[in-house]
Amino acid sequence: MTPLAAPSRPSYLRVVRASAWYDLVVTAGFATPWTYTLVHGALSSWGAALGLGAMPAREPMQTLFANLMGSVVVVWALLRVVRPLPVHGLYDAAARTLFASWQAYALVHGAPRVLWPFFLVEVAFGVVQLVPWWRNRRALPAPERRPRSAHPRELSGPTDGR
């Protein structure tokens, strides 16, 4: 398998940071039970007004999982805003692939269609962040195989057990 090389363009880091700002704006309201109450009401109203379906009634476990998701995504977004690295874009693309998969699953199983715009943004940011890695992978020469004896631990000599 060809190794992945990090995209080196500054524009890639701008995409990583932009996806982080999007996450921060969209998910900050999910991070606490009080703000989630407001977000839930807004999404329900918006979905009903646009004919996309209202959110299901809030209940404690739904709120807990919304808060967990919001808290984790806010921290992840802050890392990418403050210190965006190319590898953050790769990991974010992987996370977005997973999250979009679960959004698609929910939509297929009757979730309100108000989820569609969020699904489309997840897919778009995932693709935009993954494609440069994929292109760089194809541009690299095939890795040379090291002989089995060239394992780094074997090259370092005897150890004193530390």
Image (spheres, rainbow, N blue to C red):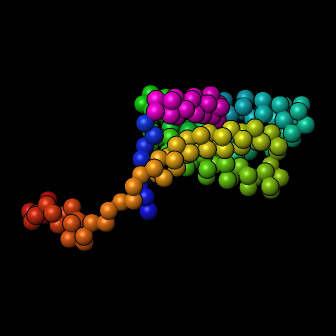
Quadrant for the C terminus in the image? bottom left
Residue 147 appears in the rendering? yes
Q: Note whether 145 is above or below 102 in the view shown.
A: below
Residue interval drawn in magenta? 9-33
At 45% from the left and 40% from the top, the residue drawn is 7
Q: Nearer the viewer, residue 121 or 82?
A: 121
Q: Residue at the location (59% across, 40% down)?
A: 128
Q: Position of residue 28 (x, y in %)?
A: 61, 31
Q: Quadrant of the N terminus?
A: bottom left
Nearest to the observer: residue 5 or residue 80 = 5
Relative to 150, is 142 on the left or the right?
right
User: In the displayed structure, would residue 43 be above or below residue 100?
Assistant: above
Spot the residue most to the bottom: 148
- The answer, for residue 55, to whether it is visible in the render is no
Residue 136 located left or right of residue 24: left
Q: How many marks?
A: 0
Residue 141: x and y, percent? 39, 55
Q: Is residue 119 magenta?
A: no
Q: Position of residue 61 (x, y in %)?
A: 68, 48
Q: Is residue 20 magenta?
A: yes
- Image coordinates of residue 121 in percent, x first then y, are 68, 38
- Toward the viewer: 142 or 92? 142
In this image, 23 relative to 110: left or right? left
Residue 51 occupies quadrant: top right
- Residue at image x 78%, y 51%? 107
Secondary structure character of the magenta stretch overall: helix
- Quarter-of-image position of residue 115: top right
